[in-house]
Image (cartoon, helix red, strand yellow):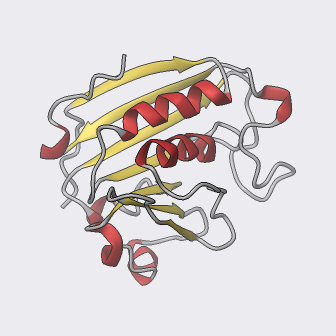
Amino acid sequence: MTGGALPAWEREYRTAGADATRGFAERLAGFLGRGDLLLLTGELGAGKTTFTQGLGRGLGVRPGIISPTFVLVRQHPNLGDGPDLVHVDAYRLGSEGEIDDIDLESTMDRAVTVVEWGRGLVEHLAESRLEVVLLRAVGGDGAPGGSGAGLDFSADDDDEERVIRIAGYGPRWEQAPDLD
């Protein structure tokens, strides 16, 4: 169930900093529902957790979203009747089998699932997915564990522009959401 090798569409957006990135993700959350899978890719400091915070705010989940780097999975319950948010950091996982071991399938039907560093590991979990790539103007070391491990936007780059590329795969995402 990979949803096809080629995306149905691709779009690129720019944000002017952490607040704008959260706001963009909050708008995207309005198009998401239970069972949706998002793969987030980007170097350290690109804004993956910041983006997920915006999704959480837009979905109406309990505040306090932080990186799941050391616990692998964090579940954020919805405060209303919308979907929960399951936030995964797959950086230290090396195979689909290890993904299966953390049992994401048990929450997929009631949650929006966001997987950082999940490309090549989680596509089998859903027929459709959104792939989100976050790019920053100033490069980083690209992997957790370096001097900036666990950081997303730092105080020094809150206003740094980000490029957000989104691609839709599978029947759920035949049409791009209107995020402009």
Relative to 81, does residue 96 appear above or below in the rendering? below
How many numbered discs, if any?
0
Relative to 56, does residue 42 appear above or below in the rendering? above
Percent position of residue 117, x then y: 53, 54
Q: Is residue 41 visible?
A: no
Relative to 175, does residue 118 appear above or below in the rendering? below
Percent position of residue 99, x then y: 43, 74
Q: Is residue 177 left or right of residue 113?
A: left
> Residue 178 occupies which quadrant of the picture?
top left
Percent position of residue 9, x then y: 24, 28
Residue at horizontal 32%, vertical 59%?
A: 81
Q: In which quadrant will I find the N terminus?
A: bottom left
Residue at horizontal 47%, vertical 44%?
A: 55
Relative to 67, does residue 179 appear above or below in the rendering? above
Residue at horizontal 65%, vertical 56%?
A: 64
Residue at horizontal 28%, vertical 65%?
A: 125
